[in-house]
């Protein structure tokens, strides 16, 4: 159960950073292109921006969309928004403009902060920034006094795939971030520790990489070119002193297969976001017995992770998979059966999460919030939980094991994907009559991409235009204009009509079989 | 057994023109699990995913010693263009 005393002790994110700026002003906070920026510089630059933003209506209770590339300037702007008492929502510059606009409209902000020229069409006021070295920003800073807030105030909003076809905004409070990296939290964060920042800016793991170290007094190095590759990791360990790394499972698998020595020099490695495969984990443990390897599990709705597990060699021999571990500080995992009664150890149930890591709500969706974050009576106590939709089991030692999903949600490279969101986007294409999205599964069980199967409307049926020419590449191109890259199906297949089962429903199994065949043979 | 290239690509096969093209084509074919890749084939013809792009680039780095970013492959999806990008990027770094 959430411990109120612990909760009150949790600092605000920007207060923690300012604390380090006073205690260790010259310590390195950020490293970019070989240049080190101190805590004092970062904090002062944030003060300069905060003074500017506060005058433009950024204050408590507001959410500010940010359209900025990853780097020291965007971190200073995020801190400035927090200092104003507001929450920030990072918008990925790589998303299609239509999605950026839809998300900004959902936020309905007073102000949008963007680099000059990078603002999509919207009604809000735009604060246009020039690219700036934060040492120059810091030089013109005046001290900014943040309004009094408590750590339950919203700090950031992440957008994840939603079944209705619109992304869901998960509103995360300060304490969900700061409680996780506190003194009793994960090892590998704090003075002397360095983490590479490689996750996409709008993703929850961006916050993990950046605020994990900055809340604790450690440093963050920005990965050039975006993608972390084995060669880049090797270089950053040598040149920037990187010692603590987060990798999504599928990326970890590639690194181990292609260049297992690239991890040499790390002091800890965290992996997760998808189910682990035992073979690469075994190879890693054999090659690097001295590097602790942690499995991390948890949805964005309980920030940053819910359970962790220091992986032991014998974990690889468990048939049902490597355990996801025990709850992190300030977090409780409760398994509920179909009648919402707590499960006994060994019994499968829905994974429900309680504690100070929980999101405040889904942005602008009170009904969905009530459904996914109900307050339940458990063993006589009223507890607010997040219903994950994951199926799990807790063993006799209190360790959680992941068993699957209650619904169709899948994970690709750590991104949550609702097939229904892709189907909703495809169904909006003029000429698509019917569509089904099916995961592409690798032999080891990981999902590597999605297949969209569709049937075209016959000529003249909707707008009078002949539509049977709507090609697979056209459909893919249209989707790429509205969906972020990770939601665009890798394979698109047109069907004359869908196979059906005896009772007239689309035969998903047959569709999956045909879709998995090379295109030439399936035709 | 790798799948046949002709199940994915309609254009006739074009043999590689340089040793580097040949080495990269072999890595791409291995990762995509097809028997061969033509220098004019697109990564997307084989339904290549971003994870496969990462694997291809990691293998190029570790076996051929060229720096390779997945983004270079995703935005230069024809094999010959990707190899040209690898060369031009490597010249920029050494310059």
Image (cartoon, coloured by chain):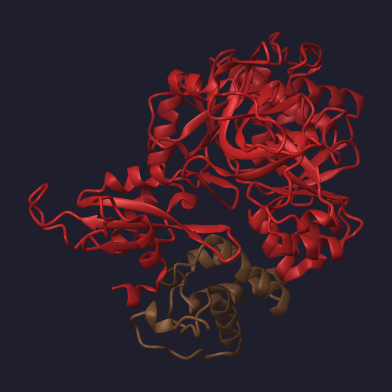
x, y percent for residue A252:
70, 58
Tally of numbered tags: 0
The residue closer to the viewer here, A41 or A86, is A86
Across and down, in percent, residue A291 comes to: 88, 54
Task: Give the residue at the far top of this rendering.
Answer: A148
Location of residue A449 in the rendering, given as x and y in whole percent from the top left corner: 49, 58
Which color was chain B given? Answer: brown
> Could you say which quadrant of the image residue A144 lies in?
top right
Q: Is residue A478 left or right of residue A9?
A: left
Q: Residue at 77% of width from left, 20% of height from top?
A: A15
User: In the figure, residue A174 lies in which quadrant?
Assistant: top right
In this view, A215 is above or below B65:
above
> Does residue A157 show up?
no
Q: Quadrant of the C terminus of chain A?
A: bottom left
Q: In the shown orientation, is residue A55 left or right of residue A321?
A: left
Question: Image height check: is A354 above or below A199?
Answer: above
Name the residue nearer the viewer: A50 or B82. B82
Residue A309 place in picture, x, y as percent = 79, 43
Specify whether residue A261 is in view. yes
Q: Residue at x 26, y 63 (%)?
A: A495
Q: Colour of chain A?
A: red
Give left or right: position of A153 versus A437. Answer: right
């Amino acid at each position: 159960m959430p411990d109120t005393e612990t909760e009150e002790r949790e600092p605000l994110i920007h207060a923690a950073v300012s604390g380090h700026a006073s205690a260790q002003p010259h310590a390195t906070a950020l490293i970019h292109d070989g240049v080190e920026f101190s805590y004092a510089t970062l904090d002062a630059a944030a003060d300069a921006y905060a003074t500017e933003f506060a005058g433009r209506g950024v204050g408590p209770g507001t959410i500010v969309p940010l359209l900025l590339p990853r780097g020291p300037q965007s971190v200073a702007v995020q801190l400035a928004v927090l200092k104003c008492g507001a929450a920030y929502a990072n918008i990925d510059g790589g998303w299609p403009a239509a999605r950026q606009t839809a998300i900004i409209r959902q936020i309905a902000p007073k102000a949008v902060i963007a680099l000059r020229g990078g603002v999509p069409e919207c009604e809000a006021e735009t604060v246009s920034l020039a690219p700036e070295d934060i040492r120059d920003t810091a030089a013109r800073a005046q001290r900014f006094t943040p309004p009094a807030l408590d750590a339950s105030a919203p700090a950031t909003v992440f957008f994840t795939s939603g079944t209705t076809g619109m992304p869901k905004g998960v509103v995360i409070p300060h304490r969900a971030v700061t409680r996780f990296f506190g003194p009793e939290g994960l090892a590998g964060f704090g003075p002397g520790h360095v983490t590479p920042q490689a996750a996409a800016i709008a993703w929850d793991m961006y916050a993990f990489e950046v605020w994990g170290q900055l809340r604790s007094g450690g440093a963050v190095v920005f990965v050039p070119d975006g993608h972390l590759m084995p060669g880049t990791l090797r270089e950053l360990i040598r040149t920037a002193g990187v010692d603590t790394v987060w990798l999504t499972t599928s990326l970890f698998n590639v690194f181990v297969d292609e260049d297992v020595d690239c991890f040499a020099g790390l002091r800890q490695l965290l992996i997760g976001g998808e189910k682990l495969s035992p073979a690469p984990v075994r190879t890693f443990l054999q090659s690097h017995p001295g590097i602790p390897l942690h499995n991390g599990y948890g949805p964005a709705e309980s920030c940053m992770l819910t359970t962790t597990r220091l992986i032991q060699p014998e974990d690889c021999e468990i048939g049902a998979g490597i355990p996801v571990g025990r709850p992190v500080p300030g977090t409780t995992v409760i398994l509920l059966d179909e009648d919402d009664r707590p499960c006994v150890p060994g019994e499968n149930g829905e994974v429900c999460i309680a504690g100070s890591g929980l999101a405040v709500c889904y942005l602008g969706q009170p009904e969905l919030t009530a459904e996914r974050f109900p307050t339940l009576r458990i063993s006589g106590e009223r507890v607010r939980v997040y219903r994950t939709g994951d199926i799990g089991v807790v063993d006799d030692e209190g360790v959680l094991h992941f068993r699957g999903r209650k619904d169709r949600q899948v994970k690709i490279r750590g991104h949550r994907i609702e097939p229904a969101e892709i189907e909703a986007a495809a169904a909006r294409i003029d000429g698509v009559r019917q569509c089904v999205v099916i995961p592409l599964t690798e032999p080891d069980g990981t999902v590597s991409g999605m297949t969209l199967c569709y049937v075209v409307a016959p000529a003249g049926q909707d707008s009078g235009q002949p539509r049977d020419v709507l090609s697979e590449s056209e459909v893919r191109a249209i989707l790429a204009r509205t969906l972020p890259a990770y939601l665009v199906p890798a394979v698109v297949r047109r069907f004359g009509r869908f196979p059906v089962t005896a009772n007239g429903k689309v035969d998903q199994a047959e569709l999956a079989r045909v879709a998995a065949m090379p295109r030439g043979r399936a035709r | 057994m790798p799948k046949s290239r002709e199940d994915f690509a309609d254009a006739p096969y074009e043999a590689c023109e340089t040793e580097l093209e040949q080495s990269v084509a072999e890595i791409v074919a291995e990762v995509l699990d097809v028997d061969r890749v033509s220098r004019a084939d697109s990564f997307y013809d084989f339904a290549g995913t971003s994870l496969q792009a990462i694997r291809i680039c990691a293998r190029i780095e570790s076996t051929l010693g060229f720096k390779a970013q997945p983004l270079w492959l995703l935005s230069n999806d024809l094999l010959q263009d990707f190899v040209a990008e690898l060369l031009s990027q490597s010249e920029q770094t050494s310059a």
